[in-house]
Image (spheres, helix red, strand yellow):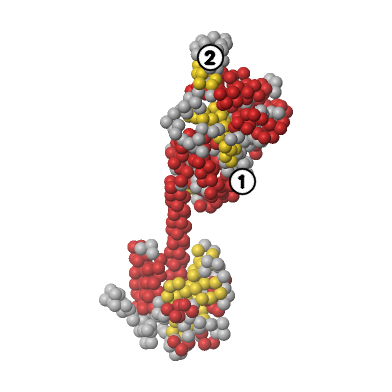
Amino acid sequence: MADATPPKSLQGRGAAAPNAASGGSPTSWRAQEMLLLQHVMALAGKSLAADEVFREMLHLASELLGLNRGRIVLLDEDGLGGSIRYAYGMTKAEIARGRYALDEGVTGHVLAHGHLNIIQDIDKEPGFLSRAVTRDNLPPGPVAFIALPIQIGRETVGVLACHRIRRRARLLADDVSILRILATLAAQLLHLKRYIEEKTRALEQHNALLSRALHADATRYGIVGNSPELLRAISELERVSDATATVLLLGESGTGKELFARALHLASPRRDKPFIKVNCAAIPETLFESELFGYERGAFTGASAMRAGWFEQANEGTIFLDEIGELPLNMQAKLLRTLQEGALTRLGGKREIRVDVRLVAATNRDLAENVRRGAFRQDLYYRLNVIPIQLPSLRDRRGDIPVLALHFLNHINQTNQRNVNLSADAIARLQKHAWPGNIRELSNMIERLVLLADRPSLRAVDLEPYFSGGGSPSAPTEPSLHPETLAIRPYVAAASHTAQQLRQAIVQCGGNKSRAAQLLGLTARQFTYRCQKLGIS
């Protein structure tokens, strides 16, 4: 290859290339340098494809300046060495041989330490490997080798290297200067390429998660996810959807029992009839009978008109009794009678009313243990436990966390007119969390992130303050409260709180019962009911 013959595409556009053997004026060499930089920068401005720019860069460096057999060696993914990724004037076999471990030969040394290395005569350098291009394939006489690090910040990501014929009038320092410029340009293009690839991967992951969420089998019931544990529960639900037997949904608080109850209703022949949901933990003990079975006019003070109870309103449909473990013993007997006979009597009434209702009950308690302690009727337990379905905790279906997180993220963004996104590493951080509050806790966490986010895209490091106990990195806390107890509600059953715990919560919150209820993971009604039941004023 001629050391200084300009390519045909450049001939006639400026100065002819100086002759390497006879020498050339500094002015003519500067013209060649400017021509090289002009074309490389123009190409970089038109195309962000680093491959195309690198090939032309090495081509022009050889044809215009005689910097022959240029190559760009990039660090391998494992970081243990590098290999030739781009080259000009080298055969495929020579490129394939160009692999170097860190500190191996001249190239490996530059890759490991990030320092410029100039070999004046490769024949006199014991550390020069001649691995890629053998000495027989190089011109006779002294041959120099120049290797410069390609660095992004302080990180060495590659090496720009080339051969140079020593018998030239051009100063070696000029060659090093132009190569420094090209190495800097290469680093910028590699940095841009890395950034684009990271963003592309993040978008692809985001789109894949959205696609999974949209095509998940469970979404037809409004249940997001497609993990084996979730699909098992849905399969059990669908198999009993046509029956009239009572279904008992078991599982931790926050696992989505209401969604499963509604899914059972939608999968059943009763789908076009009423679906009534009742939270037994939110009804004061004195109102259970009137709420469930209704009352006649004049049944008690203030009963100015007849009211149909929840069972009557659910006639021909489905009634969902959540937290059925909170049902008082006297009401358990009346519920059992209604289930056995298919009839009820309103409070203050004298006639029976026939009802056709499918009962779905749910609890996070161990009802069998409650039966042994005498807190739950054994006959009602057997009546409810006809078809028990265990709902998986979020810890048992971690594969669904990404689609659940994106589902909540899209919904909360839309509701609050925000545009907050989670990076792939943030989604991975969510998957690692234990989630004692299950799906409800995840939903609350995503809502907190969206409302308190101070940037459009959140990474894993941005989530840590929320997991470690703070509402946000800079959220103020009241001095009378412990922030670690308020960050994520503890989602425990109402019956697990003792009178001492309730009193302590009231004192800790300065007498504010709504705050005390939040502190214990209860609704205000649940908290008031528990206080009344335990005689706490």
Mark 1 sits on what residue? 434
The x, y position of residue 314, in whole percent, is 49, 25
Q: How many marks?
A: 2
Q: Is residue 31 above or below residue 169?
A: above
| Residue in the image at 55% along x and 84% along y | 125
Using the image as rendered, state which of residue 506 and residue 471 is in the foreground.
Answer: 506
Q: Is residue 48 left or right of residue 520?
A: left
- Quote the CA–CA distance across marks 2 and 1: 52 Å
Q: Is residue 88 left or right of residue 293?
A: left
Crowding at dot 1, Cα within 10 Å, few <14 / some 14-19 / many 20+, comes out as: few
The x, y position of residue 295, in whole percent, is 54, 15
Q: In this view of the protein, can residue 149 be seen by the observer? A: no
Using the image as rendered, state which of residue 462 and residue 530 is in the foreground.
Answer: 530
Which corner quadrant of the image does residue 154 belong to?
bottom right
Crowding at dot 2, Cα within 10 Å, few <14 / some 14-19 / many 20+, comes out as: few
Mark 2 sits on what residue? 351
Name the kind of residue labelled 2 in the image.
Arg
Q: Residue furthest bottom?
A: 140
Using the image as rendered, state which of residue 77 and residue 70 is in the foreground.
Answer: 77
Q: Is residue 277 left or right of residue 29?
A: right
Q: Is residue 155 left or right of residue 510?
A: left
